[in-house]
Every structure is written in structure tokens, then in C-alpha cells.
Amino acid sequence: MKIKKASNSKMIKAINEKSILNLIYMEGPIPRVKLAEKTGLSQQTITNIVNRLLSERIVLETSGVSNGGGRKPIPLIINGRNMYAIGIEIAVKYIRGTLMDFENNIITESIEQVPIYRDEEQPLKYIFRVVERLLEFVPNREALKGIGCSIQGIVDSENGIVVYAAGVRLNNFPLKEKIQEHFGYPVYLQNDANLLAIVENLNGTLASSRQNITLKFDYGIGGAAVVNKQLVHGADNVAFEFGHYKAFMGKEAYPCHCGSKGCLTTLASLSGLKRNEGYLLEEFSLGVREKNKQALQLFGKLESAISYAIANVITLLNPDHVLLTGQIIDTLTDELVPLLEQHVRELIPESCKKVKLIQLSKTPDESKLAVGLVMHEFFAVPIDQYYL
Ligand SMILES: [Zn+2]
């Protein structure tokens, strides 16, 4: 992969540095000569960039291995213990924060229970409190590389705006700007399903996949699509809101908080089950297991709606993997997942049948995923824009 020539030298410099950093992160320990080989940059450019990264203590030299009496190439690694990130999960009932270093060690955690959000300033108050507590454990200001936030809701991550998060009572709220102004660190905001997709694609279950879909059945329903290893954003940065896929018609088309009706989330999510059918997830799953007639009927309806929705999306996007996650999948794994697998396969065209349906063993802690968001942004090279 060679770097494209461009007239803007400042931009190229920044991209080159990111490329080097990314390579050391992904493939380190790696010597300078390999960095030159892999990027197509000159030895001198590599030396300049590496010297800068060494002086800022972002990378470290490790002891080299002798290659038969010649000069030892000195491998470089990321100085993960010297860099920190904060991850914040903004949930309906709590704000959870985790401080980690770049070697994935948890330094400390903090949680604020939230009985109810009364206005849009209230989530901020709790977030500030959690971040302040975590900051006490950061050794120096330069060590913290950013604050990542995960939120269940419609998020314009590009501009850091929570477009709509029903449970947290945020509506067109510039959350990134507010947190950034208060603490002075870079802040990254992402919808929970997109975040999960980013982290799983980076170094998780989707690392080897290039085209995939992540679907999260939880308090609401979230979705994320990755095409050619890039998250699909859409014109307004709100692409793939799978919860608002139109799935129910007629008298089953309950109104949705998005303003429409019949959306998948009005029944196939924790909030939908409760609001429109009066079920808590535990009651519902118990009813299904005990073969309660009413619960089974509803289960059949949900399973069918989800199967059709997944099959249609597979038909349109031709992914190699579909990742299923969220509390509904965790709780009803044995009952739901084999049926989804069978019905989706019956519904999709022969040409898409190589697709694999996979699930996470357990829905991960989002505050830790949000730490991954900071790391991802710190090391990311915007490949689609700058590489040939
Ligand atoms: Zn909707």
C-alpha cells in the first residue's frame, strides 16, 4: 500500500505519522526498516517520525534480535502503559466510566446510578462527576488521549450530537462539545451498536471480516453496517438504525418514538416488550421456556419479524458476517438463535448463503468499548480518503 501524493504537505505529514503509529500498534514490535517497506516512505521520513514519537514517549524501542552478526534492527512498540483513555457508557439507569491504559489494563472504574433523567443538563452532571473521579488516577495531563462515549440512541458521531436518545432525554444535544469544553480533552461520541461494530472489527470477532452487520437487541435496537472495513455513516451520520426498520403492519403497528409506527423496536426490544406487551424480559423468557401460550405466540411473531428483517438486510448488503448481540439475544440464545439461523437461511437468495450468523458470548461492557473508541481514533488512518 503506497501513500498517495498530494499537494498539502501538512496533511501528508499528519497522515504519514498516523500510518506509522497505526503500523506499530497493529504489527509491533516492528523495526524501522519494516515500516519503510510497508508504507513505501523513505528511511529518512521514517527516522524523523519515529524520533518525534520517541521523544513524546508514544512509542518505545525494545531490545533488538541479532540477525547473524550484523546490526540489530531495533523493534518499536507502542508505549501503552504511558497512554490512557476514559470510556463512558451513558445508559438509561446509570453512567458508567472506566479508565484504562493502552495495554487494556483497567486502572479504575466509577458508576453513578441515575433514578431518572429530568432534563438535558442532568446526564452531563453525572458524566462530569464520573470523569472527575477517574481523572484523579491519571498521572499527568498529557497521558490522557481522550474520552469516548457510548450511548443508546441516534447519534451524529461526526459532529458529536445526540440526535435522539429517548431513555436519556437528549434531543439534538451537542454532547461532545459540552464535555470537550469542560475538560479540554478530545471527546468521541458513538452510538452503542456502531461502537461495538468498530471494536469487533478492529480486534474482535469481526477482525477477519470486510463486510458485516452488527445487530444489537437491547433496551432499544441498534444496528451498524461495515462495508470494505469502513462503517457506513449515511448522509446525516445516522445510517443503519435497524430498530426503525418497518416490521409490523395493521393493528400490530404500534407508534414509535421516532415519529413513525410499526418499527422493529416497538416489539423486539426491552422497551418495546414492556411498553406494548407489558412484559419484562425475564418474564417473557420464562413464559417462552414454560411454553406459556401467550408468550409463545408473541415469541413467534418477534422471531418471524426479526428473521425477515435480517434476511432483507443480508439480501441488500451481501455481508460475510452478521453479529447478533444484546440482552434479548443473551437471555433467549437457545430459543431464538437457532430459529433465526434456520429461517434467515430459508429466506435469503442462494447467492448470499455464505454469510455466517455469529453472536458474542456476552454483551460487553460498553464503557470499555468506549475506551476502544479513543484508541481507534488515536491510531486510525482514514484509509478510504488517502490511500490508493
Ligand atoms: Zn421508529
Image: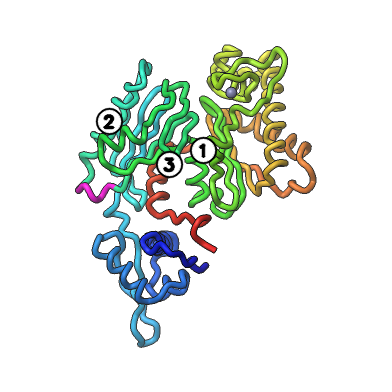
The first of marks 3 and 2 along the sequence is 2
The kind of secondary structure element at disc 2 is helix
Q: In the displayed structure, does residue 262 sit left or right of residue 112? A: right
Residue 21 versus residue 298 in the image, above or below = below
Residue drawn at x 39%, y 36% as measured from the top left: 149
Residue 231 position by quadrant = top right
| Residue on which the image places disc 3 | 369
Q: Main secondary structure of the magenta part?
A: helix
The first of marks 2 and 1 along the sequence is 2
The kind of secondary structure element at disc 3 is helix
Residue 359 versus residue 19 in the image, above or below = above
Amino acid type shown at disc 3: Leu
| Residue on which the image places disc 2 | 128
Amino acid type shown at disc 1: Asn
Image coords of residue 262 (percent x, y):
65, 20
Residue 208 position by quadrant = bottom right
Mark in the foreground, 2 or 1? 1
Based on the picture, tell me whether residue 7 belongs to the magenta stretch.
no
Mark 3 neighbour class, 10 Å CA radius: few under 14, some 14 to 19, many 20 or more: many
Q: Residue furthest bottom?
A: 69
The first of marks 1 and 3 along the sequence is 1
| Residue on which the image places disc 1 | 237
Q: Which residues are magenta?
A: 140-144
- Does any portion of residue 282 appear in the rendered image? no
